[in-house]
Image (cartoon, helix red, strand yellow):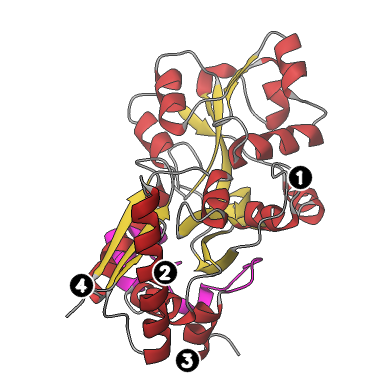
């Protein structure tokens, strides 16, 4: 009996292999969609997630494991990725799924900065979990508010990513930008999370911004050896930001989330999602969604920081990207989507 192989999103090295696998993929995808049951043939999928060690990377790995446990013939590769790039990869079929911030996926579909043209082959599986924009500073830096960053040494994440762009937007509310900080004697470092943590630990930074779960792992680890403080964002700035920019929300970081944080702090929440190729068969995406959300509580137990968000009735909250028909079918079946 011939073996049918669906090779989705893999990087193929020769034209001959590409042609053969593409022909097999068409046949198998059609069979899976017609049958209506779970795919029985070999399926290879790639998820572009976050940097290694990030929450996105961990959760995407757990989702990949759950898909493989549910469907032994599925092979899911969790690949480190970055916001902005992940949506481009899904659209170009270099990946089948990708973690992304909702607001960036929305701008990708519109073709606005940082995207040069609209993407068309992207849909949503569901929301993932929100992150929260946070600023941490050394206690001896003199930083009490975002306005105090005017002449400080700060890290803002990798250039062009969500953290960088959000930092610029927030600074603008205080009449600041990167050039003014440099002119005042400060510096701006485009450093990845773990690099920023090391720079802070070595005394080369005064503060860093990050959009992450609460508590943030890097900050918690730094507080074991350093006096690092969470810097509050004024509620009026949060309100102005959410009103001006689509795809964001208002949240609070509860008192005691970090050391030396006696009061709750306002924050900008950044809903995230997992995107999927729009051209994948409905039945394939339906069973991917089912494998994930039927076992979401297990994923939440394995990564406790997202356990409150791994609940189906909040999966579609703040979702700004249209659902894939396969995902919509699943959420209608369980009564979450009308």
Residue underneath mark 4: 72
Helix, strand or loop for disc 4: loop
- Compared across the picture, whether 136 is left or right of 234 comes to left
> Which image quadrant for residue 208?
top right
Instruction: Report if residue 58 lies within the magenta region.
Output: no
Quarter-of-image position of residue 278: bottom right
The disc at residue 310 is: 2
Q: Which residue is mark 1?
A: 237
Disc 4 or 2, which lies upstream in sequence?
4
* Front disc: 3 or 1: 3
Alpha carbon of mark 3 to alpha carbon of mark 1: how far? 40 Å
In space, the residues marked 4 and 1 are separated at their CA atoms by 49 Å
Instruction: Please report whichever mark, 1 or 2, sits nearer to the chain's N-terminal start.
Output: 1
> Which circle marks residue 333 in the picture?
3
Q: Position of residue 281 (x, y in %)?
A: 47, 77
* Boundaries of the magenta span: 296-323
The answer to whether the residue labelled 4 contacts the one labelled 2, judged by CB atoms less than 8 Å apart, is no
Q: Nearer the viewer, residue 27 or 257?
A: 27
Please state which of the two labelled residues, at mark 3 or mark 4, is closer to the viewer.
4
Q: Are marks 4 and 1 in contact (CB under 8 Å)?
A: no
Residue for point 65% across, 61% down: 120
> In terms of secondary structure, where does tag 3 sit?
helix
Q: Which mark is on residue 279? A: none
**Quadrant of the rendering where the N terminus is positioned:** bottom left
Q: Position of residue 163 (x, y in %)?
A: 59, 38
């Amino acid at each position: 009996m011939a073996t049918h192989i669906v090779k989705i999103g893999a990087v193929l090295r020769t034209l001959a292999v590409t042609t053969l696998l593409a022909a097999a993929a068409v046949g198998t995808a059609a069979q899976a969609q017609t049958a209506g049951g779970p795919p029985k043939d070999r399926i290879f999928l790639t998820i572009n997630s976050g940097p290694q060690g990030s929450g996105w990377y961990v959760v995407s790995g757990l989702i990949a494991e759950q898909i493989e446990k549910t469907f032994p013939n599925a092979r899911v590769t969790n690949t480190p990725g970055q916001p902005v790039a992940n949506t481009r990869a899904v659209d170009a079929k270099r990946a089948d799924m990708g973690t992304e911030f909702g607001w960036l996926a929305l701008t990708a579909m519109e073709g606005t900065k940082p995207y040069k043209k609209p993407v068309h082959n992207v849909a949503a599986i569901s929301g993932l979990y929100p992150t929260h924009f946070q600023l941490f500073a050394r206690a001896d830096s003199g930083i009490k508010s975002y306005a105090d960053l005017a002449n400080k040494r700060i890290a803002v994440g990798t250039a062009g990513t969500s953290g960088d762009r959000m930092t610029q937007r927030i600074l603008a509310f205080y009449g600041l930008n990167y050039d003014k900080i440099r002119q005042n004697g400060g510096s701006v470092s485009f450093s990845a999370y773990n690099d920023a943590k090391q720079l802070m630990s070595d005394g080369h930074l005064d503060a860093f911004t990050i959009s992450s779960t609460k508590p943030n792992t890097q900050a918690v680890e730094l507080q074991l050896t350093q006096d690092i403080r969470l810097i509050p964002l004024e509620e009026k700035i949060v309100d102005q930001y959410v009103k001006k920019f689509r795809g964001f929300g208002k949240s609070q970081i509860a008192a005691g989330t970090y050391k030396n944080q006696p009061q709750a702090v306002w924050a900008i929440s950044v809903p995230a999602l997992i995107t999927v190729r729009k051209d994948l068969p409905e039945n394939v995406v339906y069973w991917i969604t089912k494998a994930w959300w039927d076992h979401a509580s297990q994923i939440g137990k394995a990564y406790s920081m997202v356990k409150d968000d791994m609940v189906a009735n909040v999966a579609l909250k703040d979702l700004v990207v249209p659902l894939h028909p396969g995902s919509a079918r699943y959420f209608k079946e369980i009564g979450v989507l009308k």
